[in-house]
Image (cartoon, coloured by chain):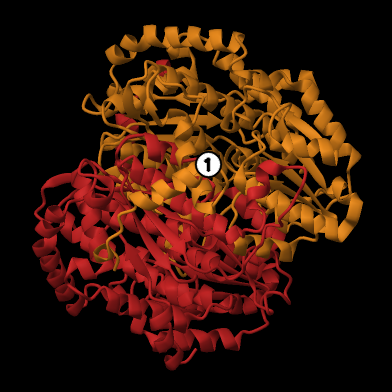
Chain colours: A orange, B red
Amino acid sequence: MSRRDHAALRQTMRIRFDFNNAMASSIGDAHGITEAALASLSERVARGHSEIARRRQAGELDWMKLPSSLNVASEIEAYVDSIKGRFDNFVVLGIGGSALGNIALSTALNPPYYNLLSPEQRGGRPRLFVLDNVDPDQFSGFLRVVDPRRTLFNVITKSGTTAETMAQYLIVRDMLVKALGDSHRDHIVTTTDAKSGELRKIIEVEEYRTFVIPGTVGGRFSVLSPVGLISAAITGIDIQELLAGAAFGDEMTSEPDLRRNPAYANAAIHYLGYEAGRTLSVMMPYSQALKDVADWYCQLWAESLGKRVDLDGRIVNVGPTPIKALGVTDQHSQVQLYAEGRFDKIVNFIAVDRFHHDVVIPPGYPPSPGVNYLGGHTLNELMDVERQGTAVALSDTGRPSVTFHLPAVNAFTVGQLMFILETQTAMTGELLHINAFDQPGVEAGKIAAYALMGRSGYEKRAAEISASRKSSPAYII
Amino acid sequence: MSRRDHAALRQTMRIRFDFNNAMASSIGDAHGITEAALASLSERVARGHSEIARRRQAGELDWMKLPSSLNVASEIEAYVDSIKGRFDNFVVLGIGGSALGNIALSTALNPPYYNLLSPEQRGGRPRLFVLDNVDPDQFSGFLRVVDPRRTLFNVITKSGTTAETMAQYLIVRDMLVKALGDSHRDHIVTTTDAKSGELRKIIEVEEYRTFVIPGTVGGRFSVLSPVGLISAAITGIDIQELLAGAAFGDEMTSEPDLRRNPAYANAAIHYLGYEAGRTLSVMMPYSQALKDVADWYCQLWAESLGKRVDLDGRIVNVGPTPIKALGVTDQHSQVQLYAEGRFDKIVNFIAVDRFHHDVVIPPGYPPSPGVNYLGGHTLNELMDVERQGTAVALSDTGRPSVTFHLPAVNAFTVGQLMFILETQTAMTGELLHINAFDQPGVEAGKIAAYALMGRSGYEKRAAEISASRKSSPAYII
């Protein structure tokens, strides 16, 4: 898509953020945010804005530069062109930030049931598998449905040491070598740090084709880097349009005034909510396509904002908990709790103005007058009134919600949405006065796992764990 | 499977429930449960036990009778036999409790990537689709991958009025009539209440084959009724073994002493936790197969326990929030928050002693000494040490967890687990002194949606909604 088309998209495909239903004027003083509370945050938001700008300038937040990495996108497109038609399957070996973005983009932007389409329906593009677990039954099952000789594996790990990914790599490499000999190298493409890490060492020996994850781009902020772009491009997603959307999202969130910046407004709403006990952030798209964007958001929010210490080193054990939900599906699962349970949630709806298809419900079915009110309407209308009905029901009981309105689901709006949510996360980190870009809390579990696995160098920890375990048979039923 | 085999399964396939890591003796007094606290609940648990027994006797809890509905299972098996080989696809039209159990059973007990297997690999059984949303793009996409002439649709709704399901029904019926004329009736099987509801009226006119949801079985407790059993049987799941497992789960949870009853012990742990601010219940299976059992649990827990009023009519706005997670995947997404964030969670691990497959990681890969510690181990070991490592890391920071140990994932253990979790939910409802079996909070949203849809009879509500909406353009960015 040309730059000119991107200019048109900025007019027609701008996301609107509506936070009326979070405000006291809509849902009452008891649970709504007052004008005064919002005003009281202005200065801190402005300070946070300066700090984010400073860190961006200093090269600490390179995920903010990804929307303008057009040369990387071109390189990926050229690579995808060069292997066109050669593979029936594209498989991501990655976990967490090296998987969730890929899944989110594919669910959002590829056709529904993508892997079940015929090769013609997929335009000759490969099926996509993301193996983000090490479940042995899933892995064995996977081998029943793909022929490795027709499969390209994308090993993705920033550090190059991720145990799950490297275990998968060792298994897959062995299998490919047995099936293909030396040409196995054509079936592996890697995505890792430019210089450091175990995978980098392997690449030097094996001479795999490789793409780089820029230095200060952390896993959960990497979807717009080659981490997310290769699988997107190879399945037919317009990655230039995705980046253009993200660049527009950057522009939309460059405004220091929280009242004119959707990312900062929602950060402020979540921060004020958190301080008032609304510690859960529900992400609930009314769109099957955006289902996994909610999952991606859950990592972004949880790992960035769940922190033991603040920037001054004080123990704070802070962290709003993200929850993924799906409209209308979860109206029949979670909304009972959202409407009647504790006042501990902020619901983020995502509404889609226009779907790609209209599906009409046939009118006039005599056996059932009780369902005939549906006839003549569309599923599109049904989705929309159900979302509105849920928002009304929540508002009526004093439950705050906000709504992101997407004109449509396409690469431009998805890129935009993701960048807005990333910036929102950065600002919420500023307001909570924590480092949103590290993840010290996952280390302890990894080390314990190394110790339990008998890895050399971890004998002391293994002994400690063994000594500290207090397991009483009385507590096992 | 014969009854004799079931007797053997009771020996080898008994689920163990380990709650050491929820107790003060393991994780400390600050966040662990003391012996005294547990003891103080004994009497209330015993009272709850009597109340559950009384209601069961009175026919108010017929979900507890489902494990012994062997004649229903036989009827379903005969039906499945009678249509063998006639359909390539089996499609559930249902939502919430009419979908989540079906999905959970299929993911747990059918092979991974079931719908991608060849017809031979599936033993000639149909693919399974569960359409639990009314997203028009998903619905259109669905029609690209299934041929309705080779498809059997299972319309599932207890009330027969569920808007989403009935809208789908009207569309599907219309499509089938156009493609097949009168014989369209052979492509629809219904599951609904024995006597009442719109769908029942339709069945009388159309003479569809139908299965009954017993009177007092609510949607979220219906997985072991025809709601869940038809899709299970037709895809090859042993539903007799499933019911035998559930019957064993019933037996395991018939003990009034919470120290000998896993369902009551976990209800007590969650109740005590809730009172102490641990209001989130994370369900985290270390098994890809059990991923959607976590989703099913989220509905069970949320709709049953999220309540505005207690049994005495007092406004309590009570409700622990369930969260689904997946090991090891979510170690790279959520565990940072679980380990460092607020002390507001109880993590329910599910461990699998033995997977169906062993996958060995090849040893001795020279280019990378740093990953070679993995070589010679199995993915099975890796799954297990990662779960243990996470449990240790959580315990070390005072975060409570419990673990359900499944000897293996099969119909017997899954039936057992589901029944234990259902009984746990009933007991938690008793301890919270609420009605765990209604869902008044979803009505308001439905009524608002009807009003917004322009349904006749809801004009007054439509006018109210319109009048009460206070939308300020200042809060739309």
User: Which image quadrant is residue A45 in?
Assistant: top left
Q: Which residue is mark 1?
A: B332
Q: Nearer the viewer, residue B212 or B295?
A: B295
Residue at point 33%, 20% (across, down): A314
Residue at point 66%, 45% (across, down): B371
Q: Nearer the viewer, residue B159 or B55?
A: B55
Residue B31 position (above or below residue A220) = below
Give the total number of marks visible in the rendering: 1
Residue B396 position (above or below residue A473) = above
Horizontally, residue B25 falls left or right of residue A422, namely: left
Chain at numbered mark 1: B
Q: Determine the secondary structure under disc 1.
A: helix
Q: Where does residue A363 sit, x and y in percent of width and height?
A: 54, 57
Q: Nearer the viewer, residue B407 or B444?
A: B407
Q: Where does residue B375 sit, x and y in percent of width and height?
A: 67, 54
Residue at point 20%, 50% (across, down): B33
Horizontally, residue B86 falls left or right of residue A287, namely: right
Circle 1 residues within 10 Å: few <14, some 14–19, many ≥20? many
Q: Say what amino acid the circle numbered 1 marks.
A: His
Q: Where does residue A412 sit, x and y in percent of width and height?
A: 67, 28
User: Which image quadrant is residue A243 in?
Assistant: top right
Does any portion of residue B472 appear in the rendered image?
A: no
Does any portion of residue B349 appear in the rendered image?
A: yes
Q: Where does residue A33 sit, x and y in percent of width and height?
A: 30, 22
Residue at point 48%, 61% (across, down): B166
